[in-house]
Structure formats: C-alpha cells, structure tokens
Image (cartoon, rainbow, N blue to C red):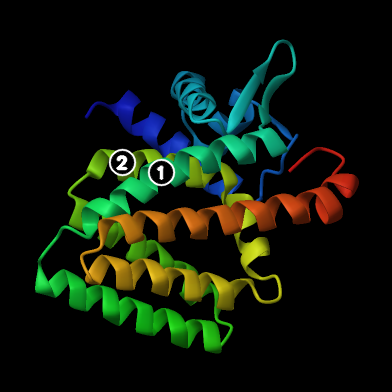
Amino acid sequence: MNIDDSHQQRAYGYILNKILLMEYRPGEYITDSNISCKLGISRTPVREAFQLLENEGLLQSEPRRGWRIYSLTIKDIEDIFDLKCEIEGFMASKAALDQDGEHRQALLNLIDQMRTASANNDIETWMKIDSALHHLFYVMARNDRAERIIKNLNNQWHRLRKGYINMQGSLENATREHENIVFAVINGDSDSADKAMHAHLNSVRNGLVKVLVTMILPYARNGL
C-alpha cells in the first residue's frame, strides 16, 4: 500500500464515520480543502475518498458548491429495502443449508443475548448483536460479497436506524422477527428462512416509511 492509498483510506474512514454518527448532517456541504486541513494530508486523496462515498450513495457532488451529504428520500428507502429483501432473504435460505452444529449453537446464543438486550432496552448492545447475527448468516451462506453489498446499503440508512429502533415496541418486535428467522435457519427450512427475513425487512421498511412521512420529513428542512 502506498502513501496515497493510505491517505485515501484515512480520509474515507474519517468522512464515513462523521456521516454515520450524524456529525455531518444531511444537506450539509463539505470541502476537500477543509478535510485535508483537518487530517494533514493533500487534497487529492480526499477527493478520491469523496468519489468513493458518492459511488456508495453517501455524498453528492454539486458544481461550484462542493460535496453535499446525501439526503435520503422515501424512494431511496424503498429501493434500499427492495435490495435488502432479495439479498438477505436468499442468504437466510442458504444459511439454512449449513449443517454446522457450532454455527447453529452460535445462532441460539445470539438470539438469547438479543432477548436480554431487548428486555433491558439496551439499544447499543442490541444493535451489536444484530450485526453479529446477520454476519453469521453470511458465514453460513458462504458469501462475503453479499455481506459487503448489504454493508453499503446499511450505511446509506444507518443515520435513521437507531431512532427507528428506539421507537416504542420496535425492539421487541424486531427481536421476535429475528427469532423466526433463526429458528427457520436452525431447522434447515430454507423457504421459511427466506420468508421470515422478507417479513422482518418489510416490517422495518413499512414502519420506517410511516414514521418518516408523519413525524420526520415535514420538519426536516434539509432531508434525512
């Protein structure tokens, strides 16, 4: 790895983290000169990082104004979840074909931990367990490429995730939906695993869109 690649990755990680943590907010403009000054690197690797983030749907270049943090629309949410349903549903069905006993026991352990986190309303822990659970599905399905695609899609709506999960009843419902997926996978029922994953993701999509339309978009001047 040469110095320019290292600087590009540093700039990419820095900006991505700021976006995910909402320290750079939707509609806000950032410049390569400002980022390069903060990081003590040249503007070229910062521009390259900007281009990567634009390709991933997180930034948008605007002539003479700079780079704007992308503002999600309802159509974006629909498109993201259409893809998530198809890819993650298929991965769940593939995971159900895995006969590894250690993997199945790990699923049971994770769902037990998820129940505990839900009962304690521990959102941060619940989200970490959720990530670990979905990662295990990809391991069982033996498809790293699908996991990378879904990670990018999740980054695009990450700014909304914690707020949605924090809604009354969302954590409990999501835990129950994950139980359905896990039990189908453990039972080796590919069709039910696919359907359970679709049901979970459509539930999230519908709840998210409803909240955005009624509670967030009317007051979000710069989008979400």
Q: Which mark is residue 150?
A: 1
Position of 69 relative to 171 (above/below): above
Q: Quadrant of the image for the N terminus? A: top left
- The quadrant holding residue 70 is top right
- Total tally of numbered discs in the picture: 2
The residue under the point 71% across, 76% down is: 168
| Image position of 220 (left or right of 12) | right
Do the residues under discs 2 and 1 have CB atoms within 8 angstroms?
yes
The structure residue drawn at horizontal position 10% and vertical position 67%, both measured from the top left corner, is 100
* Category of crowding for the residue at label 2, using alpha-carbon neighbours closer than 10 angstroms: few (below 14), some (14–19), many (at least 20): some
Q: Residue at x 42, y 67 (%)?
A: 130
For image coordinates 22% across by 44% down, the residue present is 143
Residue reaching furthest to the top: 63
Hey, what amino acid is under mark 1? Answer: Ile
Task: State the image coordinates of residue 107 (x, y, percent, origin top left).
Answer: 27, 73
Q: Quadrant of the C terminus?
A: top right
- Whether residue 98 is visible to the viewer of this picture, yes or no, is yes
Left-right relation of 10 to 71: left
Secondary element type, mark 2: helix
With 165 as the anchor, is 197 left or right in this view?
left
